[in-house]
Amino acid sequence: MKVIVETEKKTRIDKYLSEHTEYSRSLIQKMIENDTVYVNDILIDTSSYQVKENDVVDLTEDFVEETSIQPENIPLDIVFEDENVLVINKPSGMVVHPGSGNLSGTLANALLYYTKELSNQNGTMRPGIVHRIDKDTSGLLLVAKNNKAHEILSEDFKEKKVHRKYIALVTGILPHDHIKIDAPIGRDEKNRKKMAVTDKNSKHAITHVNVLKRFSSYTLVECVLETGRTHQIRVHLSYIGYPVFNDPLYGKEVIPHFGQFLHSSEITFQEPITKEMYHFKADLPKEFKNFLDSLEENEKNEKQK
């Protein structure tokens, strides 16, 4: 969505857009926080930015107005729950929160059906949502049941006190056992639905990759995030030439009926109120595990020939 600024005086971008689009001011601020607002092709990172006449504002992401979403009876795999937090094992294929044209079937809809005790710090469209993983990424996700817990967890994420590990199957045989990928990530200039390693309008991003097992055409790896950028693991692995297998956006080969082979396998965090430390693991989805089993079987058959 593009907006041409028509005002002779400089005005805060969040104020101007709230007056000239269907979006609320608070939602505009969240869009800016999520790196989805550009002025004259330059990423805007503050809501206090002053727009001027003839500026071209580009709202690149699928956002919706802050309307109430409906609770839906969708099964949840709850790994842990207390009075302040939930740890959910999200299936591949489930969107975390609603977006444009996608108001149902999300984790947020399921959470609203499960409990009324959810933070509203991120607005009505993201009840309890502290952080996200991609639609077709499976695995562990933290949810805040009240605003105090949400506030503390958000700060813990910023200060890198929450530790996450991912398991990924990549295309190709990774030659090094350990890799540190230190490459900035920003919006892809040619395709705004994608992220890319770029020096333009980007943010610092670091991913640590450890090889778990090599197959004849694939490598199973563990990824540890030092930062948390959009699509970070998928972008970084594609950048070094070993994309996540079955990734429709950044990969080389795609099989139907399952998303990218990327799984949020472990999370370590301090309970925001009680201050107790927790560590949880989630097994690979059956589709992921079955594919690995087939690779193991193929390796075994090759050795027996």
Image (tube, helix red, strand yellow):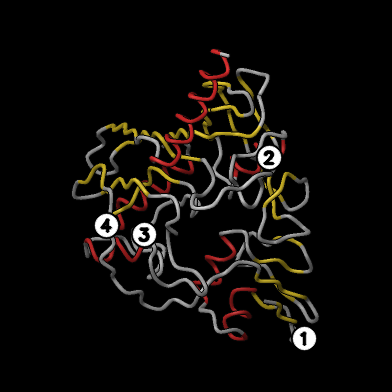
| Within-10-Å neighbours for mark 4: few <14, some 14–19, many 20+ | few
Above or below, 276 relative to 296: below
Indicate the quadrant where residue 251 lies.
top right
In x, y percent, where is residue 128? Answer: 34, 58
**Can you identify the residue that label 2 sits on?**
238
Q: Which of marks 4 and 1 is nearer the N terminus?
A: 1
Q: Which of marks 3 and 4 is in front?
A: 4
Type of residue at label 4? Answer: Pro
Residue occupying the point 32% across, 47% down: 88
Residue occupying the point 52% across, 73% down: 100
Is label 3 in contact with label 1 (beta carbons under 8 Å)?
no
Q: Which of marks 2 and 3 is nearer the N terminus?
A: 3
Q: Which of marks 2 and 1 is nearer the N terminus?
A: 1
Q: In which quarter of the image is the N terminus?
A: bottom right
Alpha-carbon span between mark 3 and mark 4: 10 Å
Type of residue at label 3? Answer: Leu
Q: Which of marks 4 and 2 is nearer the N terminus?
A: 4
Q: Which of marks 4 and 1 is in front?
A: 4
Q: Residue 75 carries which label?
A: 4
Above or below, 94 relative to 166: below
Alpha-carbon span between mark 4 and mark 1: 53 Å
Circle 4: element type: loop
Alpha-carbon span between mark 2 and mark 1: 45 Å
Residue occupying the point 49% across, 51% down: 136
Circle 1: element type: loop
Q: Earlier in the sequence, mark 3 or mark 4?
A: 4
Asked if residue 297 can be seen in this view, the reply is yes
**Can you identify the residue that label 1 sits on?**
8
Q: Residue 107 carries which label?
A: 3
Circle 3: element type: helix
